[in-house]
Amino acid sequence: PITINYQTIYSLEADPHPSEAGKFILWLNFDPVVTLWNPLDVAVDVPRHAEGRQWNYLYSFWMIPYDIMVSVNGRPEIRCSIMKSSNWKNDGNFLKLNAGVVETITMKPGEVVKISQGGDLSSNSRGQSVGGWEGFNGKKGFNYGGGARVPLLTDASSAGNSSDIRVVVSPTDTISYRIVPRQKAQSGNSPKFALTHVWLNLGGRGGSLQSFISVDSRMGYSRVQVGEQRRYGQYWGPNPLDIRADQHPEVFPVIEGATMTRDLPVNALINEKAPFMLHTYYAKTEEENLSGSRSLARFNPRAYSLNYYDLTKRERDMLPFETKMIGMTSWLSAPLDETISGQGYFGSSFGAESGSNYVTTHSVPRQPIVSLAALQHSFANGFNMPDRITPCWDGRNPDHTNRIYPMEPQISHAIGNSLAPSVIPPNKTTYNDTAATAIPNYPHPLADHSYLANRELWDDYFLSGIAPQPRPAFSQQKDQKTVAREFFKDGKKLPTARYLSSLRGADASALVNSFFSGIRPTQDSINKVASYLRVDGMFNVNSTSVEAWKAVLGSLKDRPIVVRTENGTESIASEDGDTPVANINAPRNVIVSDESGMMQDQWYGRRVLADNEIESLAQGIVYEVRKRGPFLSLADFVNRRVGSDKDLARAGAIQSALDSDDVTVNKKQNTSRTVDSAAAARFKFPEAEQGAMHYGAPSVVKQGDILTPIAPVLSARSDSFIIRSYGEALDVNGQVIAQAWCEAVVERQSDYLDKADNPDVPTANLSEAVNRSFGRQFKIISFRWLNPREV
């Protein structure tokens, strides 16, 4: 599960003074709440015990740089330090919440769940962490409990208990207050880590650091550069930018006034907590989006961590999360919407009115994939995945800055899609944004992950389908060698039925044995197998025939597809006369359409394309092919055209067609729920930011969805050709006395002209000059003479 909202609710309470009868002391109370999201189309169960330890989620909340200015009965304000109150010596994570200890974290496909303290737990201690090192045990939903409590200390308090100065009040007093940002962390280790942060350890205290979300983190203040390896403790700050809360009112505002505060009678605070503020880190949605930029397009669910290095508008526009302080005047003003079963909301909003309890954006394969475009569901983002076994503290191991911070910008679906990153100029695929930071020698490296991944994959790799066939996806379970033997020797079909064998005189049994050691493929079999395959009718992406594109795009029409229920039970959907969109492997069997309004089912349902939408898309693709072609390779077709022409640089051919005003597939969503032009104008490539704000939702058809079913049979060239020739004889006067027409069908073969070079040898490594000059053989398949009526 992915954490999409980290919330801390701050409240005031009054408890009897320990030595003065009739007097009370003000206390701070903290309620931690997190929202988890399963983005996958399968249920996720995080076991409580594995490999001898608990695999619970331990959230650690750092202090916030705020003071609360308290006035009793209108008297002069008393500055009270939330930082000093919440932690001993102003160091450490003051509040901890466990998820997965008293309740196993089990989430349905796409489910959104809230976790908070599990009952009426409270702590009056003031130690390294309120509630102890292990923190509160969380349960589903928002549970109104005792919270974690500490005395509210004035700013004149020192770092130890002996000099605590508390706020003493009477039951008849009335308190007014305002909350103001502090300049910086006071002392101790706070500046070493961050202005504020939340981190998540997998496996409890001492477990591996799974995620880290922060403002001005010293552990990563200088961004990791391409190829750089770091270890824990390297490059700790302080940040030369010295970010201070009071200098960023758009993030750390003063909370005051009648709409954000209220007067509090002390007698109403006795044994009752009154909320006054909420701090949150949250993933952007359509509604909760201060920057107005795209939400899911730059949110990779596997990229757990991020740090605000400078809090500039540019940085906040780019990142998929936002941080905000919210003044609260009652519990009803808290953004804590949930269902009776503890589910939260996500998608269009964290609120119940527009949000959804289920949001499915990525698939887990049930069987080996056969299309490169299906890799859009991989979490490719230019980072190394964390080792959940190794504690992050071990200085001998790579630092978590390498393991969990992705190379920016994040991207939701990289492979097979082609949207240009709006944070990079249109003529670049990698970029060092030196203007993004004032830190010398530490530019901000950015990359177009889609372009770079597509370039490496689409021209050099394909998926043959010669793979293990597991149950229940297949009626009979088979290992990989059995699949290969039945294909080459027995003539059985592969999952891509148009892939045929081409033995070229080889013995089928001997060939299969050469590909395997036991039942596992040998190291070089990946390079050889393609030379023994042929395709029955590749489709040339340079085609400008609308009818041809209609036939290809509609190839899934009335085909049975796997669907599931809310609980994940899978079945086969009945035919509906339309063409299903190959987005999620097993979507909910709820058909959604291109709607201008925010609909809950758009986040978990499935799209189908009617015949008129297929025709509209085919026309749009042909228009783009004429504008961009000829495509010299498949990657050239899939990718955008990097350069100064912004129209071509914005996206690849299919995505550009989907975004066209003349194509009906996504038209309502593209035109009514878009990024505001003023917000887009703040980006390096504004045109790339424009479009559906919720791109990445199942209701928005992407280029990768269109490519998934057709990619195995696409090519940027033809291997079969019809060649016609004409000849004539002239008399002495130059008059035609005889004419002849002929036609030959020829096919390109896998063998080179000189067979001294094997078919699997790359052209750059050919040894024979004739092969370097003329390449592969052509074979005449048929020849015939034509009569004049056929010409």
Image (cartoon, helix red, strand yellow):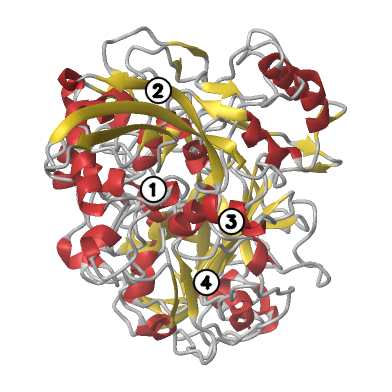
Q: CA distance from mark 2 to mark 4?
A: 77 Å
- At horizontal 74% and vertical 74% (from top left) the residue drawn is 231
Categorize mark 2 by other alpha carbons within 10 Å: few (<14), some (14-19), many (20+).
some
Q: CA distance from mark 4 to mark 3?
A: 61 Å
Q: CA distance from mark 3 to mark 1?
A: 28 Å
SS at mark 4 in the image: strand
- At horizontal 70% and vertical 47% (from top left) the residue drawn is 757
Which is in the foreground here, disc 4 or disc 3?
3
Q: Horizontal and vertical percent for residue 559?
A: 39, 13
Q: Which residue is mark 3?
A: 772
Residue 273 sits in quarter? bottom left
| Between 298 and 750, the one nearer to me in the picture | 750
Q: Is residue 553 left or right of residue 789?
A: right
Q: Is residue 252 visible?
A: no
Q: Which residue is mark 4?
A: 196
- Residue 783: mark: 2
Earlier in the chain: of badge 2 and badge 4, it is: 4
Earlier in the chain: of badge 1 and badge 2, it is: 1
Looking at the rendered structure, the kind of residue marked 2 is: Phe
Looking at the rendered structure, the kind of residue marked 4 is: Thr
- Marks 4 and 3 close (CB-CB < 8 Å): no
Q: Which residue is mark 1?
A: 638
Looking at the rendered structure, the kind of residue marked 1 is: Val
Residue extending furthest toward the front: 732
Q: CA distance from mark 1 to mark 4?
A: 42 Å
SS at mark 2 in the image: strand
Earlier in the chain: of badge 4 and badge 3, it is: 4
Figure quadrant of the C terminus: top left
